[in-house]
């Protein structure tokens, strides 16, 4: 690894200090309060909340904090807006919620994990962690060895070690792992699993950055823009085909593997049935039991993000919206260039003699307000009362027939024609045209549509046969004809 001078490292970290939201949270004046509130409401079983629900919960907590003498003068909505602007929270809109939702950003999650590790530090070196590192290192050495002979030797050594342990178990010389050592190993696994939400947040952030980068490339002129446009028009999914997309696809395929999922759940069940599992906290047992489900849920979220970005990118290109944005981008750059050239000669406060309409109403004083007078929209004091009349059953039937197809009547017509035809030939088929020839289409085209639907459901549709000409009288008395694919009834309709 190349040596980095202290000055260069310090300058780089100073830049990170200004850009990284995680550092901003840690160095905030009220960082303990912010971290506690975010941890309580957005870092548990519900990583995402509707904005109004989050405001309500935090307002209740702020009242409790004030009762304990802490200075938190603003409202929950004001604090949440500040946290969102600082990059601790991310605002999203979802189809499941009527309004916007809020969740922790990747930087916010990273800051909470750091504070959690300082609040409840784990032992720096454990047998479980050392064994895990040793096993991974040995596997890496085997998999990367270019010599097939040495790889075979190491694999045979592992096989001999497994055979020796099998003999030891058979002879009763290998005791099962239990007690504090087993609990320690489970806790080490859970510590590694706790990092997975951070990974998902980073992956989602990578896809968001990639989506923004691709749109910027589309707006730019030159060969890069042409290549991106050509790929989109050819149907290439640039999001899924990126390095991040391919990496996530491999991870997702592993998570959704049925064999892996079944084996994982069975292993979790067996571990939780062991005696040492009683020493685990309720939170640890729940985290272990729900870990695979959490992976699948978060993986599905990332899939939705990839799909949404890919569709949006294709729609953005194929609708030609990018051309309008390119024109707007060019005008903005031109205006900025003119402003730069003008800045040495014209002061910012110099009057330009141009009137620009504001997008909102400017209120100069309270006297400019017009109060709402409810009496202006009062209903008249005398209201007319209309007594309801007794409903006419026939009128209701006619209304129903005018709005819905009478399948009962059509079914009776089909069965009647079919019975008559099969009295002479038990294998006879009856087409829609035959039924219309024997029974009038009382509902006009609606009767025709109903017969076609019944034939498709209870008969056969023969696209290879010659089309059938249908004739009927419409509701307005006009005679109509149509040629349709031959539909035939094969039996009585129940």
Image (spheres, rainbow, N blue to C red):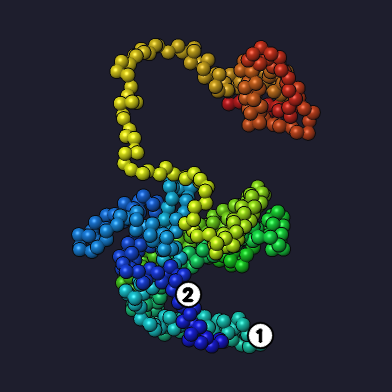
Q: Residue at x 51, y 87 (%)?
A: 5
Q: Dividing the picture into quarters, in which one does residue 438 lie? A: top right
Quarter holding residue 209: bottom right
Give coordinates of residue 450: x percent, y percent: 62, 25
Q: In this figure, which residue is indicated by the disc labeled 2?
A: 15
Q: Quadrant of the N terminus?
A: bottom right
- Residue visible at 46% across and 13% down? 393
Q: Secondary structure at mark 1?
A: loop
Is label 2 in a helix, a strand or a loop? helix
The quadrant in which residue 326 appears is: bottom right
Neighbour class for label 1 at 10 Å: few (<14), some, many (≥20)?
A: few
Residue that badge 1 annotates: 146
Foreground of the two, 447 or 267: 447
Assess whether mark 1 and mark 2 are in contact (beta carbons under 8 angstroms). Answer: no
Q: Measure the alpha-carbon separation of dots 2 and 1.
A: 42 Å
Residue 61: image x %, image y %? 27, 58
Judge whether residue 66 can be spotted in this image.
yes
Query: Which quadrant, please, contains the C terminus?
Result: top right
Q: Nearer the viewer, residue 299 or 169?
A: 299
Q: Nearer the viewer, mark 2 or mark 1?
A: 2
């Amino acid at each position: 690894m190349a040596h980095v001078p202290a000055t260069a490292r310090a300058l780089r970290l100073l830049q990170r200090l200004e850009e990284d939201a995680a550092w901003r949270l840690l160095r905030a004046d009220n960082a303990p309060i912010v971290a506690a509130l975010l941890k309580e409401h957005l870092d548990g079983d519900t990583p995402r909340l509707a904005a109004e629900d989050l405001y309500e919960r935090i307002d209740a907590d702020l009242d409790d904090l004030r009762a304990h003498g802490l200075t938190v003068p603003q409202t929950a909505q004001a604090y949440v807006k500040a946290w969102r602007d600082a990059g601790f929270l991310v605002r999203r809109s979802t189809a499941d919620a009527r309004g916007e939702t809020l969740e922790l950003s990747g930087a916010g999650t990273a800051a909470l994990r750091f504070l959690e590790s300082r609040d409840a530090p784990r032992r720096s070196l454990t047998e479980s962690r050392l064994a895990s590192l040793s096993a991974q290192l040995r596997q890496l050495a085997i998999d990367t060895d270019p010599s097939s002979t040495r790889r075979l030797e190491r694999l045979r050594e592992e096989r001999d070690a497994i055979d020796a342990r099998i003999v030891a178990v058979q002879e009763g010389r290998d005791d099962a792992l239990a007690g504090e050592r087993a609990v320690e190993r489970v806790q080490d696994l859970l510590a590694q699993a706790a990092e997975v939400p951070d990974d998902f947040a980073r992956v989602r952030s990578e896809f968001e950055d990639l989506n923004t980068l691709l749109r910027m490339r589309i707006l730019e002129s030159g060969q890069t823009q042409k290549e991106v446009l050509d790929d989109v028009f050819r149907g290439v999914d640039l999001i899924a085909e990126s390095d991040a997309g391919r990496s996530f696809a491999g991870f997702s395929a592993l998570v959704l593997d049925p064999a892996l999922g079944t084996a994982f759940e069975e292993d979790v069940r067996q571990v939780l049935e062991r005696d040492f599992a009683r020493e685990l906290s309720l939170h640890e047992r729940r985290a272990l039991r729900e870990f695979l489900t959490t992976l699948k849920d978060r993986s599905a979220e990332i899939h939705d993000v990839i799909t949404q970005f890919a569709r949006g990118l294709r729609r953005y290109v194929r609708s030609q919206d990018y051309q309008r944005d390119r024109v707007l981008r060019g005008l903005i750059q031109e205006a900025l260039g003119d402003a730069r050239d003008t800045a040495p000669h014209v002061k910012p406060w110099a009057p330009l003699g141009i009137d620009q309409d504001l997008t909102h109403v400017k209120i100069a004083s309270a006297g400019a307000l017009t109060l709402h007078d409810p009496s202006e929209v009062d209903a008249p004091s005398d209201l007319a009362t209309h007594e309801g009349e007794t409903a006419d059953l026939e009128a209701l039937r006619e209304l129903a027939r005018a709005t819905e197809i009478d399948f009962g009547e059509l079914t009776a017509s089909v069965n009647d024609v079919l019975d008559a035809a099969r009295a002479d030939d038990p294998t006879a088929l009856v087409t829609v045209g035959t039924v219309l020839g024997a029974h009038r289409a009382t509902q006009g085209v609606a009767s025709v549509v109903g017969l076609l639907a019944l034939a498709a459901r209870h008969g056969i549709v023969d696209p290879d046969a010659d089309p059938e000409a249908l004739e009927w009288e419409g509701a307005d008395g006009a005679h109509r004809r149509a040629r349709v694919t031959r539909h035939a009834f094969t039996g009585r309709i129940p």
